[in-house]
Structure formats: C-alpha cells, structure tokens
Image: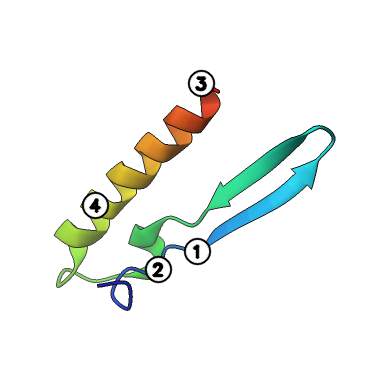
Amino acid sequence: MSLLLPCNVVLETVGGGTHVVIADPRELMPGDELAELADEAAAQLAAVIDALDGT
C-alpha cells in the first residue's frame, strides 16, 4: 500500500525541538480514482500532526 500512499514526511531539528512537515496526499494523488483514499490518508496525517502539537 505504501506505493499508493506517497506521504512525504520531513523532520528538521530546530532549536531544542523538531519541525515536522507532512505533504498533503490529496496534492500528491490528484484525480477522482484515489480521492477517497487520499482523503482518508489526509485525515490520518492530520491526526498525527494534532497529536504532535500536544506533546
């Protein structure tokens, strides 16, 4: 499945913490064929960002 989910994640050390950037899978998988999958992946990645914001 990872071949179908191009979810690029970049981690960068900034000061005493880590800056996390996650590409939006809806931008990386345009078109209607994979829209539902891309939306679900985006929601899951948004949950990851929210969890990281709380730490």
Find residue 47 and report its horizontal and vertical position in percent: 36, 35
Which residue, given by chain and number where applicable, does mark 1 sit on?
8
For the residue marked with disc 4, what is the amino acid? Answer: Asp
* Mark 2 to mark 4 CA distance (whole Å): 11 Å
Which residue, given by chain and number where applicable, does mark 3 sit on?
54
- Circle nearer the viewer, 1 or 2: 1
Residue that lies at the very extreme toward the right in this rendered image? 15
- Circle nearer the viewer, 1 or 4: 1
x 30%, y 44%: residue? 44
Find residue 3 and report its horizontal and vertical position in percent: 32, 78
For the residue marked with disc 1, what is the amino acid? Answer: Asn
x 50%, y 63%: residue? 8
For the residue marked with disc 3, what is the amino acid? Answer: Gly
Asked whether disc 4 touches disc 3, contact meaning CB atoms under 8 Å apart, the reply is no
Which residue, given by chain and number where applicable, does mark 4 sit on?
39
How packed is label 2: few (under 14 Cα within 10 Å), some, or many (20 or more)?
A: few
* Mark 4 to mark 3 CA distance (whole Å): 23 Å
Asked whether disc 2 touches disc 3, contact meaning CB atoms under 8 Å apart, the reply is no
Residue that lies at the very extreme toward the top in this rendered image? 54
If the image is split into quadrants, where does the N terminus sit?
bottom left
Asked whether disc 1 touches disc 2, contact meaning CB atoms under 8 Å apart, the reply is yes
Quadrant position of residue 33: bottom left
For the residue marked with disc 2, what is the amino acid? Answer: Leu
> Which mark, residue 28?
2
User: Mark 2 or mark 4, which has the lower sequence index?
Assistant: 2
The mark total stands at 4
Asked whether disc 2 touches disc 4, contact meaning CB atoms under 8 Å apart, the reply is no
User: Mark 1 or mark 2, which has the lower sequence index?
Assistant: 1
* Mark 3 to mark 1 CA distance (whole Å): 22 Å
- Circle nearer the viewer, 3 or 1: 3
